[in-house]
Amino acid sequence: MSQSLASLSSPDNTSFTTSSTTFSTIYRSLGSVRTPRQRVRPASSTASVYAGAGGSGSRISVSRSSSVWGDSVGSAGLVGMGSIQTEKETMQELNNRLASYLDRVKSLGTKNRRLESKIREHLEKKGSQDIRDWDHYFKTIEDLMAQIFANSVDKGRIVLQIDNVRLAADDFRVKYETELTCTSLWRVTSMDSEM
């Protein structure tokens, strides 16, 4: 890195010259406050120092070469190239994965079409066979259902007859008990009258 000393022209004007940038700071008196003003401009690699204080003048030339800026640029370039290389490798890996997924999808699509074709052929062969006639089974089922219904009606009729017979038996029993009671009372009354 080029480094130069300062050139002092006056107490209020100080300029610094370096290999890459010249900083010129001009101080202007504003009472007790000084405001700096800076300028930045490119400069050469040779640095010169002028000292004019006290009437004695001297000149010192200092020339130093440095590759810090160039080295930093080169390092940044290498880092950038490494980053680009890494991005390229990442993109290549992603492309390879995508290609693998696409091949997988294509293979599954082919297998799916084959299965659909086999299913279609099987259905066509099955449809071409003679369809069985189930009408006689339906006829038998209908006859059995009619018999079940008729038997249910007969069962209801029989249950009703049983209930009627039970009611009649109860009625006859009540009548018998009533007549028996009346007969017993008549006999007792007859015996009392004879006594």
Image (cartoon, rainbow, N blue to C red):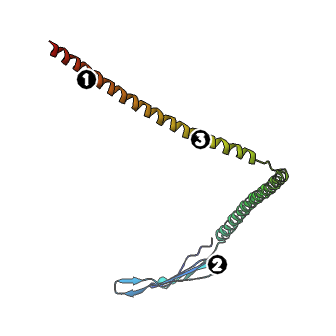
Decide: few, some or many residues near mark 2? Use Cα within 10 Å; few <14, some 14-19, many ≥20: some
> Could you tell me which residue is drawn at 62 percent across and 81 percent down?
43
Q: Residue furthest top?
A: 195
- Which disc, if any, is residue 56? none
Q: How far is disc 2 from disc 1 in space, using C-alphas?
A: 160 Å
Q: Which residue is mark 1?
A: 182
Which of discs 2 and 1 lies nearer the camera? The answer is 1
Along the polypeptide, which appears first: circle 2 or circle 3? 2
Please, what is the three-letter code of the amino acid marked with disc 2?
Thr
> Could you tell me which residue is drawn at 72 percent across and 62 percent down?
91
Q: Which residue is mark 3?
A: 150
Decide: few, some or many residues near mark 3? Use Cα within 10 Å; few <14, some 14-19, many ≥20: few
In percent of width and height, residue 179 lies at 29, 24
Residue 141 quadrant: top right
The front one of 156 and 8 is: 156
Q: Tell me the SS state at disc 1.
A: helix
Please, what is the three-letter code of the amino acid marked with disc 1?
Cys
Note whether 61 is above or below 96 in the view shown: below
Residue 182 quadrant: top left
The front one of 149 and 86 is: 149
Note whether 51 is above or below 118 in the view shown: below
Which of discs 3 and 1 lies nearer the camera? The answer is 1
Note whether 141 is above or below 192 in the view shown: below
In percent of width and height, residue 147 lies at 63, 40
Which of discs 2 and 3 lies nearer the camera? The answer is 3
Q: How far is disc 3 from disc 1 in space, using C-alphas?
A: 48 Å
Along the polypeptide, which appears first: circle 3 or circle 1? 3
Note whether 109 is above or below 55 in the view shown: above
Q: Which residue is mark 2?
A: 46
Please, what is the three-letter code of the amino acid marked with disc 3?
Ala
Q: Quadrant of the C terminus?
A: top left
> Could you tell me which residue is drawn at 83 percent across and 52 percent down?
118
